[in-house]
Image (cartoon, rainbow, N blue to C red):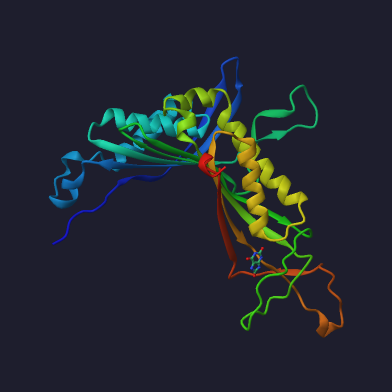
């Protein structure tokens, strides 16, 4: 005997670009390019077990909904759009019990101008790299929710100011300790909001209008870049831990911060066959394998203080 123990479905990779025009000057624009996923959970079992499709909200309808609501709603910041979409599906379809929304926003920043009254051009944008801002929201009909935000694929490299020594050495070890190496990674950082502090999903709109999510994003990004650049890193592990701690200090409404960092190795090329020294000047990127280091830093519960 078997049974359907779990299921969810929806549309993934729904992409759009929205242009927001300043009502006072319609030539001044903001743009948002986003990739959205919405998954629905609920009383859909019979579509799987009995071939009864009557409960299915087609994934095509899910896609249309994302695009229609992106057109009608002020979707900045993405946390606000995630909450709007989640509430829409719960309110419209009584048999949907939970919604899982994930939004990735592509990084278009205004092009700066050399001269002029304004520091940036009104409707010209620059995409520097593959960096994404992201938000995920799980919302249940009973009102419980889990909101997270983050940054992904923020690629950084430092050419000195990174060490790695004092690690366990055994008969399998070939790595040489170093006090000066290249450190490079694609930052993937996620911060989970404390649902109790946010109150209800309905407060997300007000918090968004007060800049809470934008401020947290800018703070987390700045902490990540500043610590990466300024610290003489003893290891990826210690550096990511310090970054997460600092973000928790700066943003009181967060419950925890997770980093997932590939260690993108660059190896010093051995020029001894040419009688040449290599004083950390010429490296070659290692295509694979790479280290992968993850940690979550949470606030110490009051009971443990
Ligand atoms: O910062 C590092 N952490 C490790 O765990 C590790 N392992 C390794 O080979 N190099 C590094 N670097």
Q: Is residue 24 left or right of residue 47?
A: right
| 14 shown above or below 176 | above
| 44 shown above or below 175 | above
**Image coordinates for residue 297, horizontal then vertical, percent:** 57, 48
* Location of the C terminus (image quadrant): top right
Residue 190 visible at all: no
Q: Is residue 166 left or right of residue 210?
A: right
**Image coordinates for residue 200, horizontal then vertical, percent:** 42, 27
**Image coordinates for residue 25, horizontal then vertical, percent:** 61, 17
| 131 shown above or below 61 | below
Q: Residue furthest top?
A: 24
Query: Which picture quadrant has residue 276?
Result: bottom right
Residue 13 visible at all: yes
| 76 shown above or below 302 | above
Residue located at (12% from left, 50% from top): 50
Residue located at (75% from left, 32% from top): 113
- Foreground of the two, 13 or 283: 283
Q: Is residue 216 left or right of residue 65?
A: right
Query: Which picture quadrant has residue 267?
Result: bottom right
Residue located at (53% from left, 39% from top): 302
**Image coordinates for residue 115, horizontal then vertical, percent:** 80, 28
- Foreground of the two, 79 or 240: 240
Quadrant for ligand 1 reads: bottom right
Q: How many marks?
A: 0
- Foreground of the two, 53 or 201: 201
* Location of the N terminus (image quadrant): bottom left
Q: Is residue 147 left or right of residue 188?
A: left
């Amino acid at each position: 005997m078997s049974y359907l123990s779990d299921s969810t479905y929806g549309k993934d990779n729904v992409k759009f670009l929205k242009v927001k025009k300043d009502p006072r000057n319609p030539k001044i624009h903001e743009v948002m390019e986003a990739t959205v996923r919405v998954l629905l959970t609920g009383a859909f079992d019979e579509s799987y077990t009995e071939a009864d499709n009557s409960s299915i909200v087609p994934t095509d309808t899910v896609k249309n909904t994302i695009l229609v609501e992106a057109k009608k709603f002020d979707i900045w910041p993405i946390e606000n759009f995630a909450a709007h979409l989640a509430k829409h599906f719960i309110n419209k379809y009584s048999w949907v019990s939970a919604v899982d929304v994930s939004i990735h926003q592509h990084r278009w920043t205004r092009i700066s101008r050399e001269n002029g009254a304004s520091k940036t051009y009104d409707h010209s944008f620059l995409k520097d790299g593959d960096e994404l801002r992201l938000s995920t929201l799980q919302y249940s009909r009973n009102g419980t929710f889990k909101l997270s935000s983050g940054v992904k694929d923020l690629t950084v490299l430092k050419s000195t100011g990174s060490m790695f020594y004092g690690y366990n050495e055994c008969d399998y070890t070939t790595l040489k300790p170093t006090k000066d190496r290249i450190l490079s990674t694609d930052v993937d950082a996620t911060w989970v909001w404390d649902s109790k502090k946010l109150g209800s999903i309905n407060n997300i709109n007000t918090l968004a209008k007060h800049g809470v999510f934008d401020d947290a994003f800018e703070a987390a990004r700045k902490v990540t870049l500043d610590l990466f650049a300024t610290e003489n890193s003893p290891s990826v592990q210690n550096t990511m831990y310090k970054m997460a701690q600092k973000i928790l200090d700066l943003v009181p409404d967060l419950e925890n911060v997770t980093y997932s960092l590939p260690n993108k190795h660059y190896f010093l090329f051995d020029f001894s066959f040419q009688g040449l020294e290599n004083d950390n000047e010429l490296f070659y990127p290692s295509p694979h394998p790479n280290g992968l280091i993850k940690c979550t830093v949470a606030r110490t519960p009051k009971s443990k203080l």
